Image (tube, rainbow, N blue to C red):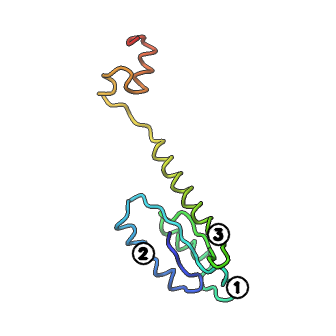
Amino acid sequence: MLLYDITKYESLMGLTQWIEDVKRYAASDILMVLVGAKQDLASKKREITIEQAKKFASHYPEIVDVVETSAKESVNIETVFTTLTRALKEQHDTKRAIVRTPTFRDLQSPHKSPLCSKLCSFNDCCN
């Protein structure tokens, strides 16, 4: 989660270095959510619109969403965690969906792989 203050434009620009540090030191498949703080001050002191934040985030494919929050008024706090959790689950499911190709060793041992098991049932060779 990368936090910026919607009432201070510099806070969004300062995230550039934080994002580069995360990309340098974290896992290559890291996911991030951009969190705009102090939404309760939006009508009086806003310097960054949600559109500007989304445009900034669009330059970083690791950022899955932009959410404005207010800790003071308890707005969208849960949404940040839900958004990140869903993105992580989707990433996990996508990785698991990659089909593993059977190796020669798998094919040598009967019923060790789903492919071999299926072939054996058709050929009736290992029953």
Q: How far across and down, in percent of the image, does residue 87 sit?
A: 54, 56
What residue sits right under mark 2 in the picture?
A: 18
Within 10 Å of disc 1 (Cα), the crowding (few <14, some 14-19, many 20+) is few
Within 10 Å of disc 3 (Cα), the crowding (few <14, some 14-19, many 20+) is some
| Discs 2/3, front | 3
Q: Residue at x 42, y 25 (%)?
A: 115
Mark 1 residue type: Ser
**Mark 1 falls on what kind of element?**
helix
**Seen from this angle, which residue lies furthest bottom?**
44
Give residue 54's quadrant in the image.
bottom right
Nearer-the-camera pick, 63 or 59: 63
Above or below, comparing residue 106 to residue 15 in the picture: above
Above or below, comparing residue 26 to residue 47 in the picture: above
- Of the two numbered discs 1 and 2 on the same chain, state the one appearing first in sequence: 2
**Mark 3 falls on what kind of element?**
loop
Nearer-the-camera pick, 101 or 2: 2
Mark 3 residue type: Asn
In the rendered structure, find residue 43 and report the number of the disc placed on it. 1
In the rendered structure, find residue 76 and report the number of the disc placed on it. 3
Give residue 43's quadrant in the image.
bottom right
Q: Residue at x 53, y 51 (%)?
A: 90
| Discs 1/3, front | 3
3 vs 23, left or right, is right
Mark 2 residue type: Trp
**Seen from this angle, which residue lies furthest right?**
43
Q: Residue at x 53, y 67 (%)?
A: 33
Tell me the distance, in whole angstroms, between the alpha carbons under discs 2 and 3.
Answer: 23 Å
- Of the two numbered discs 1 and 3 on the same chain, state the one appearing first in sequence: 1
Q: How far across and down, in percent of the image, does residue 28 sit?
A: 38, 59
Q: Residue at x 33, y 27 (%)?
A: 106
Above or below, comparing residue 107 to residue 122 in the picture: below
